[in-house]
Image (cartoon, helix red, strand yellow):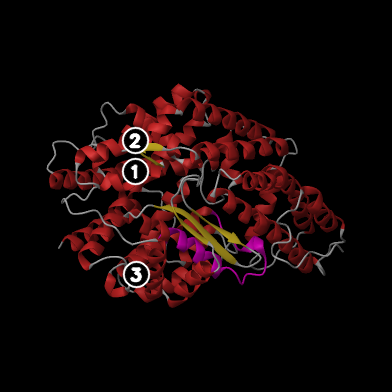
Amino acid sequence: MTVLPGSADAFQNASWSDLLPFYEELAARPLDRGNVESWLQDWSTLESLIGEATALANFAYARNTADSKAEEAQLRFSSEIAPRAEEQRTKLQERLVKLGYVRAGLETTVQRFRNQMELFSPANVPLQTELAKLSTEWAKVIGAMTVDWDGQEMTPARMAPFLEDNDRQVRERAFRRMYEPYIEQRDALANLFDRMYDLRQAVAKNAGHQNYRDYAHLEKNRFDYTPDDCFRFHEAVEQAVLPAVKRLQERRRSHLGVDQLRPWDQLVDPKGRAPLRPYADVSDFIRHAGDVFSHVQPDFRREFETMANAGLLDLDNRKGKAPGGFCDSLPVRKLPLIFMNAVNVDDDVRTLLHEAGHSFHVFETADLPLLFERHPGAEMAEVASMAMELLAAPYIDREHGGFYSDADAVRSRRWLLERAVIFFTHCASVDAFQQWMYTTPEGRDADARDRKWLELRRRFEGDSVNWSGLDAERIARWYYQPHFFEFPFYYIEYGIAQLGALQVWRNSLTNRGEAVRKYREALALGASRPLPELYKTAGARLIFDSEGMRELIEVVEEELATLDA
């Protein structure tokens, strides 16, 4: 038997030729019901070592997309190692499935393995390599974007604080500047997307599917809902959420005292109060967050501080960083890491609470014996993050060591709930856009894509906000969304999970301790149970219908009325 290295960073500089012998040994080793568990454990250890090295390479590159050595390492893992490793995994998956071995906790793993086996095509290995290279190329383009703000070179993300300015002219100027680089580079981004689109459609056809949409739903192991359920979700948003969004927008318009809302009126305080500035610097940000987590559950503070002390938090925005935010896991050390672009706005608080929810999920599943049992689909992973935003919200005031005075904490909590409602309209448009793009030939036409995006935004956002004269900026919003480029079809999960998180939060309104207990119990199951069972354990259910959606929106509106009082 090839002995696996014991060091967590053993594969940091590994090439594919270094890793292949470990897969070949697992593929050749005699396998029966007597040794299958030790075989699975060795395979899990191998994947953990590779996963750890991959996560660290991605983290290093995201922190500085201008670092050529970091880029080289990231490309080695994403384009050289990952596609070939997937090919070897399929062989090992087939061995387990053919053995017919299933035990308690492994049922969903075997179901996933069978599904991935059926999807795999050797012809897709070089295509996945090309897609990984294009993803790196995209990140480099975005990471290099800057805008000129009164003579200072800033990233587009740095415009966010100015969108909260009480001077409407300043907000408008910041809004236009934020999207300026995306408008200027629209053709380059559209060309990148075209190349990704072609490769993805080819991947689907090689796997025996008519289009990438059908392939992606299976590739993401969506066993418990279908594309038709996604369309039900879109319709439910129109019926149950859009009326509530119109009520929220009318309240905002009235408080602002304007005839019509414009896009740059969405983040400013509607009552003209000073923008919320939650922390002095990043260390202050981390300290307050730890205090907040301690009130949700003391273990969460300890876990968050473990990450901070290990240097696994990169929170501040700077030139050269990749956009967005994420949490990744280091499966050997059983530690998570958090990456984000904080610019000292209220939204930073939500982002950190969100990503910390993912990190607590990593901690909760650490005791599951196999890596394959730890990671559920995004539909449950995002419940971990979105529910944490809501469960932590009551403790963001200074009385609990949080970020704000009592009055400012109410403002932040109100905005969290408003955003939870408004988010569904964005989620529905993103998913509907992808459903359309990958199932029609027009999806390959850049101009047709832009026209469809405008059509869907009008459908799901209604006419509460006046976008006249801003088609270019509105179109730029989809180029601004990283999921279209890096994580295709990863977005409806946010909507499904937000409904799950709102149910966890609703339960907490009557029994907070019990709601947190169920939340942790569900997270600790990892991927060992089917999705509906994970939701049930958390005290929730999967919702695609307008009635279930409307019920939760009404609870949110009731809570908003309480905060107003």
**In the image: residue 302, left or right of residue 239:** right
Q: Give the range drawn in magenta.
A: 353-377
Q: In this view, does 155 lie above or below 527?
A: above
Name the disc covering residue 508, or none. Answer: 3
Of the numbered discs 1 and 2, the one sitting upstream in the chain is: 1
Question: Mark 1 belongs to which amino acid?
Answer: Met
Q: Mark 1 points at which residue?
A: 159
Where the C terminus falls, by quadrant? bottom left
Q: Which residue lies furthest to the front in this view?
A: 151
Tell me where residue 65 sits by quadrant.
top right
Q: Circle 1 sits in a helix, a strand or a loop, which is it?
A: helix
Which mark's residue is nearer the viewer, 1 or 3?
Answer: 1
In this rendered view, identify the residue nearer to me: 69 or 289.
Answer: 69
Question: Residue 256, percent across and down?
Answer: 15, 45
In this rendered view, identify the residue nearer to me: 556 or 111.
Answer: 556
Of the numbered discs 3 and 2, the one sitting upstream in the chain is: 2
Q: Name the residue under label 2.
A: 177
Q: Residues within 10 Å of mark 1 (few under 14, many from 20)?
A: many
- Real-space Cα separation, disc 1 to disc 3, in angstroms: 35 Å
At 45% from the left and 43% from the top, the residue drawn is: 230
Q: Main secondary structure of the magenta part?
A: helix
Question: Residue 129, percent across and down?
Answer: 68, 39
Question: Mark 2 belongs to which amino acid?
Answer: Arg
Q: Are marks 1 and 2 in contact (CB under 8 Å)?
A: yes
Q: In this view, does 1 lie above or below 67?
A: below
Question: Residue 343, percent across and down?
Answer: 37, 52
